[in-house]
Image (cartoon, rainbow, N blue to C red):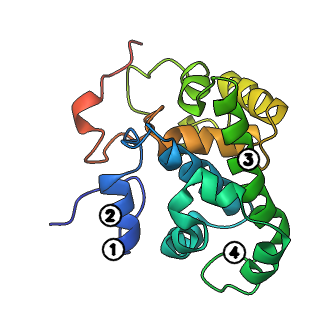
Amino acid sequence: MDKVRCFGSGDALYAAYHDEEWARPVDDTADEAGLLERLCLEGAQAGLSWITILRKREGYREAFHGFDPEKIAAMGPDDVERLLGNPGIVRNRQKIEATIGNARALLAMHEQGERLADVIAAHTPEPRDHAPLTFADVPAQTPESVALSKELKKRGFRFVGPTTLYATLQAIGAVDDHIHGCWLAKDRVAQAAP
């Protein structure tokens, strides 16, 4: 019997993402490459379906040096032109330039003694005491994601609107929006008092 999922059933890649990664903390925050990857991929997803980006994820990792911020920040106009011809990623100039700019913004934060993980943690909503009943109960953005968007834009990040950042918070496990009935939500579902 197949597991009941919030999303991803019917596609092995999507199901694995749901089961093994979505709403789970990012492990490699020491150099923040994992956070940069999630942030940039969520930005690349803007206007597209997540499965499109998920299918191109390895292409992104190859094109952007495993999301090593220093290597990405060193990329220039010739790299942008080359990447515009790369079918392994979404070939959108603004999104490519945003990934490079976001790596530079991250390094500038590090030079100021700041970490992306800390800024995100300071703008994470309180955990839910119960699983949402449907995706209609999941917000597209929250006051925290609005504030986080403003903070990151001030630091030079792009493609970091409040909805994109709420999706990032979901992707990195800062919020857990597995829906009631999902096999990953079953242990934490509590009925709300009437």
Residue matched to label 1: 12
The image position of residue 136, as x and y in percent, is 57, 42
Q: Are marks 1 and 2 in contact (CB under 8 Å)?
A: yes
- Asked which quadrant contains residue 16, the reply is bottom left
Q: Is residue 153 left or right of residue 102?
A: right
The answer to whether the residue labelled 3 contacts the one labelled 1, judged by CB atoms less than 8 Å apart, is no
Which quadrant: the C terminus?
A: top left
The answer to whether residue 193 shows anywhere in this view is yes
Q: Around disc 1, counting alpha carbons within 10 Å, would you say few (fewer than 14), some (14 to 19), or many (20 or more)?
A: few
Q: Nearer the viewer, residue 73 or 154?
A: 73
How far apart marks 1 and 2 lie (CA) works out to 6 Å
Q: Secondary structure at mark 2?
A: helix
Marks 3 and 2 sit apart, C-alpha to C-alpha, by 31 Å
Q: Is residue 21 above or below residue 118?
A: below
Which residue is tagged 4? 90
Q: Height in image: 149 above or below 4?
A: above
The residue carrying mark 2 is 16
Q: CA distance from mark 4 to mark 1?
A: 21 Å
Q: Amino acid at mark 2?
A: Ala
Amino acid carrying label 3: it is Arg
Q: Residue at x 55, y 58 (%)?
A: 67
Task: Say if mark 2 contacts mark 4, CB within 8 Å.
Answer: no
Label 1 residue SS: helix
Residue lying at 57% horizontally and 70% vertically, measured from the top left: 60
In the image, taking residue 156 as reference, residue 59 lies left or right, namely left
